[in-house]
C-alpha cells in the first residue's frame, strides 16, 4: 500500500462551503467517508466559462 502525505491545508475542515459548491462538498465528503459505497466514482466538472 502506498502512503501519501496530504497537505494539512487541504482538508474538509478547512474547506469553505458556499452556495456554488455546496453539492460538490457534500458529495466529496460522502465519497471520502464511505468509499466504494456512495458516489463512486466521484467526478466533478464545472461548466465552461466563468460563473458568478
Image (spheres, grey):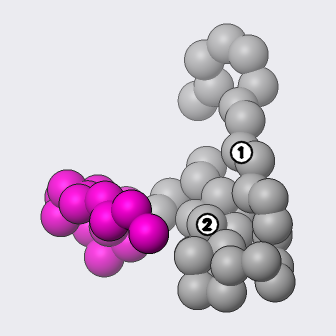
Q: Residue furthest front?
A: 1
Q: Earlier in the sequence, mark 1 or mark 2?
A: 2
Q: Which quarter of the figure is the C terminus placed in? A: top right
Q: Left or right: 29 with respect to 6?
A: right
Tell me: residue 1, above or below residue 36: above
Query: Under tag 2, what secondary structure?
Result: helix
Q: Crowding at label 1, few (<14), some or many (≥20) Cα neighbours within 10 Å?
A: few
Q: Are marks 1 and 2 in contact (CB under 8 Å)?
A: yes
Q: Which mark is residue 44?
A: 1
Res. 19 in view: no
Percent x, y of residue 47: 76, 25
Instruction: Give residue 37's position: percent from left, percent from top.
Output: 81, 83
Kindly identify the residue that appears in the image at 46 percent across and 63 percent down. Answer: 17
Using the image as rendered, state which of residue 27 and residue 38 is in the foreground: 38
Which residues are the magenta region?
1-16
| Residue 2, magenta (yes or no) | yes
* Residue 27 visible in the picture: yes
Amino acid at each position: 500500500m502506498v502512503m501519501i502525505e496530504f497537505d494539512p491545508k487541504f482538508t474538509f475542515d478547512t474547506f469553505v462551503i458556499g452556495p456554488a459548491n455546496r453539492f460538490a462538498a457534500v458529495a466529496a465528503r460522502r465519497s471520502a467517508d464511505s468509499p466504494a459505497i456512495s458516489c463512486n466514482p466521484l467526478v466533478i466538472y464545472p461548466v465552461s466559462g466563468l460563473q458568478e
